Amino acid sequence: MKNKLLIEIGTEEIPARFLNEIGESLKEKIKEFFESESIDFEKLETYYTPRRLVIFSDGVSEKQKEKTIKIKGPKKSIAFNENGEPLIPLKGFLQKNESKIEDIKIEKVGDEEYVFLEKKIGGRTLIELIEENFSKILFSIPIKKPMKWDSLYFIRPIRWILSIFNDQLINIKIGNIESKKETKPFLKTTKEKIEINSVDDYFKHINDEGIFLSFIERKNKILNELVGYENSLKVEILKDEDLLNEVTNLVESPKVFYFSLPSRAKELPNEILAEILIKGARVFPGYKNGELVFSFGVLNGIFRKEDFVKDGFYSVVKAKIDDAIFFFSKDKEVPIKDRIDSLKNIIFEKNLGTYYDKTMRLIKLLKELYKDLKLNESEKILLDRATLLSMADLTTLTVQEYPELHGIIGGFLSLESNEGREVGEIISEFIYPRKKGDRAPKNKLAKILGILDRVDTLVGSFLVKLEPTSGEDPMGLRRISLTLLKILTSFENKISIENLIEYSLKTFDENLKRDFNQEDLKKFIKNRFRTILEEEGFNYDIINCILNVEPLIPFISYINGRFIKEIYNSNDFNNFILAYKRIFNITKNQKTTDIIDEGLFEKEIENELYGIYLDLKKEIETRNILELEKIYDKFIGSVKYINEYFDNILVMVKDERIRINRLNLLKNLLNLFKKFGSFEDILKQ
Amino acid sequence: MTFQDIITELRIFWSKENCIIGEGYDIEVGAGTMSPLTFFGVLGNKLYRVAYTQPSRRPQDGRYGDNPNRLYKHHQFQVILKPPPENVIEIYLNSLKSLGVKEEEHDIRFVEDNWESPTLGAWGVGWEVWCDGMEITQFTYFQQAGGIDLDPVSVEITYGLERIALFLQKKDSIFDIDWSDNIKYRDLRLLEEREMCIYSFEEADTEMLRKTFDFFEKEAQRLIENNLILPSYEYCLKLSHIFNILDARGSIGLTERNQYITRIRSIANKCAKLYLKVRDEK
């Protein structure tokens, strides 16, 4: 029979947001431990619920593999004196390795003789190893917000330990807790402990208690039940991914229930209502014919009666709705434009000032950005107004209670305050996408406001050294840059990252700019862009090719990337790359200028290629840059001339004037191509 | 179960768990934590258990008695256990059982919620406890108070009494709660809610309060310099309450706000430090 190992750490409720990373990191640590101790296993899994961290290994070896290792010691010349007696270096070496002088050998390495020790290691039992090391392994898990109890530090207090190898107890002690062959039932106040005699026994009892140890199983159970209700009630449920992950980690034994919303719910717009349900009560909104009428909650305990729980959740939701109606009606009493001044009381970031300061910066930034936008006067008037009002809803009671309603409340208030439908729409839309996978704003002006807001946060945060580090991202800049790029690539524009940074910098205080390195920020944004493109399935070489272009215009890079992806496997593109690389290689490291003297041409093909160059240059200058197909047609059309040129012309001739003139032509042609990508990065032959 | 029955039950329950049964402090506080029974009780390494009801004022939360779920003043039942016993969660759940809330019938859940009081230099990690979705208790492992790392740590269990009564009595509005068999919460407290809100939001004389703050702060400083810990701390609590009124009145700007908090915290920290020192000398 296969050996089975099971360790269950019983804890008080581990916060939902940390559970997965703790459980997964425990698995890594155990795996590293098994590997370093030469313990073989067929299967190693960790499972986790809010109250249990479980390690399970099947087909695990009972003992370490034995092996002999050879340890190199000191040189023979310093190990012994003339009488052959051991000296300090050798004594120390033996002591360190817990060995005797009889165990050593002398071997030659190169010209020198050295002391060597052959030592058998291993052969210890898994039980021994775990007893000795487990507590060290457990506490090596990185914990983001640890707490102290009984002089120990972990995410929450540990209250019991079950650890068995087949049917044998493994003795582990953590603080005052000693392992036993016992686990705890689902209900905490049920006094009985459950005796566990084997690993199979454990899984059976856990199953009888209605506990689902695996995150995936719990999540799928919830999802399946939600889908079941969608079909039986003919509703559409907003299965918010964050909420789903959270509730999955708030329960050991999930079961979905539902109830109808109180009638007053109709007094609130769907958007506000959904936020109250998700953030306020952690239940899923259910829509019937577009109207939000149901709530779907997840209770803990599959054998539990639903009635009490339903009643409880219903009154919570009702209270929150009553509250929100009160807030929202109070908020409507003060027109949105009269709220701008109160933004002086709300801090954006302590070194970057208040939201009032931020609003003023956005207005300046917009003026700068107008240079790169083609907007008519009436569009500008709308956008100016929306920008001025964009942060004002942060002063409302509703947003203070539900921060994620920022923007949405601003939109409603703008309508209430007669700011007009368009302004309201810009404000309620610019916050999208709010997270990965979310949609971009629906209209162009909202997109522009969304860009302003995000660029200001990005540049500002880098100015005051709040850029993300490996673990921390206090301003959420990863998400912000991701959503910024998502907006920039969602509509036709020629806004470059370089210009955005430069314009935004103008809106910040000079004192803040002293240690600012623009390249760091550019690199950060580029890396996020890379991530997006990778996730969309672009080849690495295409990504490199389109990102090494200056200035970096995300929209153009994006459609350019898609275009290259389409023609990537064609012969024409292949030939173009070969021709391009010929030019690239010969002009590499050569000093060139943009002066090309036709008088120095010797052969007709030189004139022809020059003609091609001029034609392409004109094409790029005049042609709408978005008509990539036309431009790539010209690229491909030039291949034949380039090849003929190289077949007939020796570029690197002795005559310096002629040589430089030839290099100049080639380099200038190359630079035209380079506006669309560093094609030398394309790896195909 | 009436509002007063709930308090009585909890007192009996925690008395059986060897808690000192204290009384609510007689100076305005924002939470049970601010009572000296907690603030000083959690310091030092002596074993300590206490439980008491604390009326708590939060001017910002007031709604003139118009909102069924919000109050200027609410009641907390506060428990401190130092050090926390291993089965502290079970004990807490049993206290709910004594109120008629059984774990087998109700979905009681511990949802992460960490707590911090910048004015007291105190923080802890823990949960809000949900009963069928309603938050009824704040459960915190206190890690620091008065800027001092606690050793051993204490557990702080804070029952929201109005929430529990709403739940047990199945009422939609706090004001409908039965305080006793024949008196409603409304009868006893509605006028107070209304008037205290008018005061805090509209009537409070901010000039006078600012001056008073300065006077009281000086007094607190003078007292702590004379090694009078508790009198100094009482002035510190008064400062905190004045600050809360000024805040509700909308009279405190942003930078000012941080300055006020720092001023209060500095006295609280001094009191905590001196308290530990004096205790050690004893």
Image (cartoon, rainbow, N blue to C red):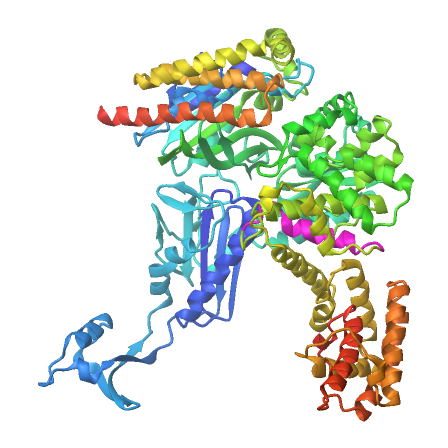
Give the vertical position of B214 relative to A320 (above or below).
above
Give the vertical position of A102 relative to A180 (above or below).
below
Question: Is residue A99 in sight in this rendering?
Answer: yes
Rendered residue at 39%/13% (across/down): B219
The image shows residue A71 at horizontal and vertical percentages of: 29, 79
Question: Is residue A318 in sight in this rendering?
Answer: no
A640 relative position to A402: left or right: right
Of residue A520 and residue A272, the one placed in the foreground of this image is A520
Give the vertical position of B26 relative to B79 (above or below).
above
| Residue A480 forms part of the magenta stretch | yes
The image shows residue B206 at horizontal and vertical percentages of: 58, 12
Q: What residue range appears in magenta?
A: A472-492
Rendered residue at 77%/31% (across/down): A261
The quarter of the picture where residue A382 lies is: top right
The quarter of the picture where residue A258 lies is: top right
Of residue A56 and residue A586, the one placed in the foreground of this image is A586
Rendered residue at 74%/63% (across/down): A536
Give the vertical position of B61 relative to A33 (above or below).
above
B193 relative position to B47: left or right: right
